[in-house]
Image: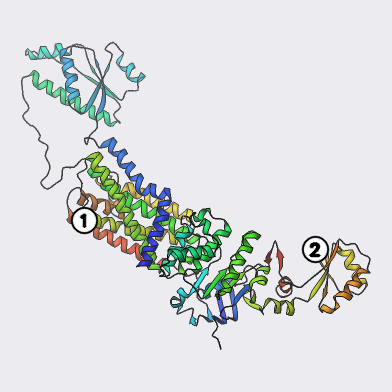
Amino acid sequence: MNRVLADIKAFGIQYLRSRVGTFFALVFPILLILLFGAIFGSSGTSRATLFVQDVDNKSASHAFIDALNQTNLTTVQMIPGTANFSQYLRDHSINVALQIPAGFQEALETAQNGTRANVTLTLAGDQTQSSYGIAVSAVNAIAAKFNLEVVGASPVVSVELTSLPGLRHFTYIDLFLPGIIGFTILSTPLFGMTAICSEYRSRRYFKLLATTKLSKAQWLASKVVFHILLLFASVALMVLVGIFVFSMKAVVTPMALILIMAGTLEFTSLGMVLGIFVRDPETGAAIANAIGFPMMFLAGSFFPVDAMPAFLQTGARFLPLTYINEGLRATMTFANDTTALVDLGITMVFAVVFFVVAARGLSWKSK
Amino acid sequence: MVEPVIDVRDLVKRYADLTAVDGISFHVDPGEMFSLLGPNGAGKTTTVEILEGLRNPTSGDARVLGVDVRSGYRKIRERVGVLPQDFEPFDRLKPREAIAYWAALFDRALGDTEAADLIQTVGLTDRADALAMNLSGGEKRRLGIAMSLVGRPELVFLDEPTTGLDPGARRELWGLIRQLKRQGTTIVLTTHYLDEAEQLADDVAIMNHGKVVAHGSPTQLINDYGGGSAIVLAGAEDAGLGALRARGITAELQGTDVVVRVPVAGDMRRMLEKLASIEMPLNEIYTRRASLEDVFLKLVGARMQEGVLAA
């Protein structure tokens, strides 16, 4: 036991003195959370900038623009009423803009008096941009409201937003943070152990260690325990940032801690397998990248697997990280430990297989 | 009779298409400094790694501290210290930390005073708190020797400890190795530096192509195989060689020098007088005692190239 503790301590000192390792284990996930949280996190949706040219420039068009501003979907910026609408959009590289034509108020007043009238708003924009879709929704909603008011009607069908029973009220960060934890569980041990095993072999540290009383199993255990402690520290930092910066509601449950430990064992072992069996350190790093990076995206670290095409969803079922991400979201965000337990079981199977392969492949002795 | 620290009999290590160690036998007595000497690829490191328990032999017997290396190496690991070939310390550990770490791996709690003494022994007191990556080559080897000593071993393997070091650092390490020997530690020194073996070893086994081709003390080997003393006619070249041969004197050309062997020490004066009477172009004339290099020349066919043996 003392040998394992001594190895953890010595390895930890070296790891923390390697600023690259510390950065990717502790700082990089925080930067990702701050970056993605700032982009998507504030209210679950983002406001689109909508440029508006009010050619009519009367009280009705002013009321329409005020209503657009109050939707929280759009931020209105005005285009001079005398400008050429199309030319202005091109000159200023504007994604989406609304033109309220002359006669807007007159058409509304005519309709209010019971006479048929029609006025057409022009919404121009780049349909590939998300801001376009947001602007369409906002403008259609306000136009419908104005149409109802003109004929003196009130809405019949309305929608009340509420949470499901037992479901924690969550925001974007509550869904995103478990994915970032999964990403860190993959990246820190996998890339780290691949490099460490390659270095230990090329610099003959394994041979050096073989001359001591430290056994192969003790060395492997030391690396797994170290990475679990490192991941716990990393998760603690991430959760603190989530809570204090983004008011995160997701909870680090006991099941989440067990999943983090199982996942760390899994990817520490996979890193050892790559580092031990791939002779060339550069090749080992390349293979770790080739495995790790696609897995981060396909296993749902940054967006849910359900949002992917069907064939990719099928592929994701074969990726070990998928079960860590889904298990962490299930227990941390949706308080569903039953689902997380299944994910934990699958993760443990992967972990044991990788660990056994690594333990059998690592040779303390030369041939 | 004292039991040998190392007892090797008919040891063989064979790979698919290579016999690295080919039936060698030797023993090392307690307190002895034993040197395995040979050119690169002679089988020295393979032999030492078998004795360190890092490789299994194909056949033969090897016992270290009375224990068979195949089955019982775990039992004697704490009694043996090892400085491997091309030793590299852990870059981001300081010598003080590395020594404490290594002691823990031998289940030894090293007190501050004991650690400081060990650091002082290897001459690293001033560098004890520098990162290992910032140590010089010689300092790194000294750290390696300190790590090999933390378990207070009865036997220390030093596998090419001075390879790649400058002459000053080599001599500093020689002093440290002599100090270990004075303290009664049995040392197995693997080297391809002839002067190192000659300076340090009590007993030398010369290996070539996996076999021990000669075994004995450096003096004994030089007497048996060195061909006695020699007179060197520096710069005499072919003309000098021809002049000597015309007088019936046996000589050989080594580079631009002509070398005349004098197997019996009592003949030296007479031969010098004889050579002085011969007209030939030369820069300098001097005598030299036979060395391990001469032994090598005879037994292995190896010469020194930039201070290192080449087969």
Q: Is residue B157 left or right of residue A122?
A: right
As helix, strand or loop, the secondary structure at mark 1 comes to helix
When asked about the image quadrant of residue B6, the answer is bottom right
x then y, percent, for residue A277: 44, 61
Q: Image height check: is A98 above or below A238?
A: above
Residue at 20 percent across and 58 percent down: it is A341
Q: Is residue B118 left or right of residue B164?
A: left
Which chain is mark 2 on?
B
Q: CA distance from mark 2 to mark 1?
A: 79 Å
Q: Is residue B52 left or right of residue B199?
A: left
Residue that label 2 marks: B255
Tag shown at residue A277? none
When asked about the image quadrant of residue A122, the answer is top left
Residue that label 1 marks: A254
Residue B133, visible in the rendered structure: yes
For this rendering, which residue is in front, A338 or B289?
B289
Query: The N terminus of chain A is located in which quarter?
Result: bottom left
When asked about the image quadrant of residue A95, the answer is top left
For this rendering, which residue is in front, A86 or B98?
B98
x then y, percent, for residue A82: 28, 10
Mark 1 Cα-neighbour bin, 10 Å: few <14, some 14–19, many ≥20:
few
As helix, strand or loop, the secondary structure at mark 2 comes to loop
Mark 2 Cα-neighbour bin, 10 Å: few <14, some 14–19, many ≥20:
few
Residue A311, visible in the rendered structure: no
x then y, percent, for residue A25: 36, 49
Q: Residue lying furthest bottom in this view?
A: B1
Q: Amino acid at mark 2?
A: Gly
